[in-house]
Image (cartoon, rainbow, N blue to C red):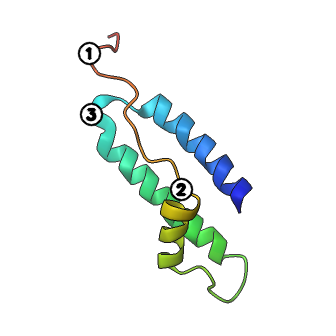
Amino acid sequence: MRELIEELNQKLRGHYAYYGITFNCRKLHTYYNRTKHLLHKWLNHRGRKRVWTWNKIAKQTTEWMPLIRPKIYHGYRLAKP
């Protein structure tokens, strides 16, 4: 699980670095939340019994092994037209 979260954080960091411009904050948070939902879906997909509840995923991704939160990397004033 730790390796999965580390790899997922690396991919999230790259996504935020590329798309993290000033007025894209809402979409970055949508991407973050959608990633958590897909993680929940695929962890429960492995067996017939639903082991991962949404509360357990939320605690996993915020306290135990946190996912990287969205961050603005580029200001719109510094962007070249």
User: In the displayed structure, would residue 59 be above or below residue 35?
Assistant: below
Nearer to us of marks 2 and 1 is 2
Q: Is 81 displayed left or right of 14 in the figure?
A: left
Q: Earlier in the sequence, mark 2 or mark 1?
A: 2
Mark 2 in CB contact with mark 3 (< 8 angstroms): no
Q: Residue furthest bottom?
A: 49
Q: Residue furthest top?
A: 80
Q: Earlier in the sequence, mark 2 or mark 3?
A: 3
Local crowd size for mark 1, using a 10 Å CA cut-off: few (<14), some (14–19), many (≥20):
few
Which kind of residue does numbered mark 2 sit on? Pro
**Disc on res. 3:** none
Instruction: Give the quarter of the figure containing the N terminus.
Output: bottom right
Gap between marks 2 and 1 measured at Cα: 31 Å
Instruction: Give the quarter of the figure containing the C terminus.
Output: top left
User: In the displayed structure, would residue 5 be above or below residue 48?
Assistant: above
Which kind of residue does numbered mark 1 sit on? Arg
Nearer to us of marks 2 and 3 is 2
Residue drawn at (54%, 38%) of the image:
13
Residue drawn at (63%, 77%) of the image:
44
User: In the displayed structure, would residue 76 be above or below residue 26?
Assistant: above
Which kind of residue does numbered mark 3 sit on? Phe
Gap between marks 1 and 3 measured at Cα: 11 Å
Q: Earlier in the sequence, mark 1 or mark 3?
A: 3
> Which residue bears the numbered disc 1?
77
Local crowd size for mark 2, using a 10 Å CA cut-off: few (<14), some (14–19), many (≥20):
some
**Residue at disc 1, secondary structure:** loop
* Residue 59 in the image, given as x and y percentages of width and height: 50, 70
> Which residue bears the numbered disc 3?
23
> Which residue bears the numbered disc 2?
66
